[in-house]
Amino acid sequence: MRPLPSAAVVATAVAAAAAVSALVLLPGAASAAGSPAPAPAPGASTFTISDPRIKESSGLAASKIHPGVYWTHNDSDDGPYVYAVDSATGRTVARVTMAGIGAPRDVEAISLGPDGQLYVADIGDNLGGTWDHVWIYRFPEPAQLADVTVKPVQFTVRYADGPRNAEALMVHPVTGRVYIASKSEDKGGLYEGPEQLSASGSNEFRRIADVPWVTDGAFSPDGGSLTLRGYFFARTFPWKDGKPQGEGVRVDAPWQGQAESVTYTPDGKVLMFGSEGANSRVVAVPVPGAAAGSPKPGSTPSPGSPPSSAAPAATRDGGDFTVGAMVLVAATAIVLAGKRLVGRGRRGD
């Protein structure tokens, strides 16, 4: 019987195998080739709103001129205020006071339009849709982050089919058209505003689609998708011909006790989900396929779902050839090294 290799020889071979296993199994290890993973874009990570004045954050809008900053507001009983929160620290870096609009009744949403202006939606109606009109306030996004008082343009809104309770307002990032989603246990509606809002008279919003119980919504930065969220769901719909298409694709939104807000990061790669409550968290959820380019509407799998089996697994880590070649070379090296080590062990015995 030939003598077995020494313990040192076996340990060396095992360590080599473990090293290659780690290379193959660690996400992105093969493609990175020792390079550090890229840092997330500013504002694309989960954060906590620390300002004690913000107890009912009910809307979110990502700033386009201040990287990593999000605009938010309280639901009600706070006053005519909008807050800028730095996602890097969770601290408020500016508070905007809206003058000349009286006392807001129930501010529920905020959106940033392609005109660089913030649209603040005083559209809530917890009395079951009894107010015959609601309001939208609009003012330019402040160029400097500091406490400031502005005088917004005030728009009166009425619905073509009667009063509604609503919590979601979305401004299309290409056309600038304003949309409101009503909130209903049975079946809500998506309402389209006029091509241009008018500060004189009222603006009639007409129903163009049925939607679930919606608490907020947001368009993707390219305007090709609309994401709607409720207390127990979130779905992304392809947007075509001025309407959401199909049943949408499920989004793995986080569980939040008061699921009230959603917005995209400016690059469209991440959805940010917010909630009411003191020290509320804003949770980042990557948009599937966004890192590799814009997905085709309706073809995007939900976050956390396995990649399509039609695509080679190695493609997701930097290319078939690169990963396959590295694994083959590493495996061959282990086999050859093992043979040499075992042979040396035998000769040494």
Image (cartoon, helix red, strand yellow):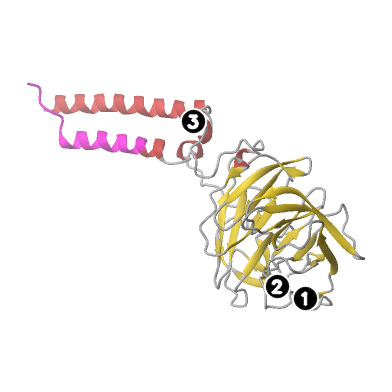
Please tell me whether residue 42 belongs to the stretch shown in magenta: no
For the question of whether residue 338 can be seen, the reply is yes
- Residue 291 appears in which quarter of the rendering? top right
Residue at disc 2, secondary structure: strand
Q: Check disc 3 and report the residue beneath it.
A: 314
Q: Check disc 1 and report the residue beneath it.
A: 148
Magenta region, residue range? 1-21
User: Please, what is the three-letter code of the amino acid marked with disc 3?
Assistant: Ala
Residue 70 placed where, x, y %? Answer: 67, 63
Of the image marks 3 and 2, the number of the one nearer the N terminus: 2
Q: Check disc 2 and report the residue beneath it.
A: 94
- Mark 1, other Cα within 10 Å: few <14 / some 14–19 / many ≥20: few
Q: Label 1, label 2: how many angstroms apart (C-alpha)?
A: 8 Å
Determine contact: label 3, label 2, CB under 8 Å: no
Of the image marks 1 and 2, the number of the one nearer the N terminus: 2
Of residues 286 and 235, the one drawn nearer to the viewer in this rendering = 235
Residue at (70, 67) in percent of width and height: 124
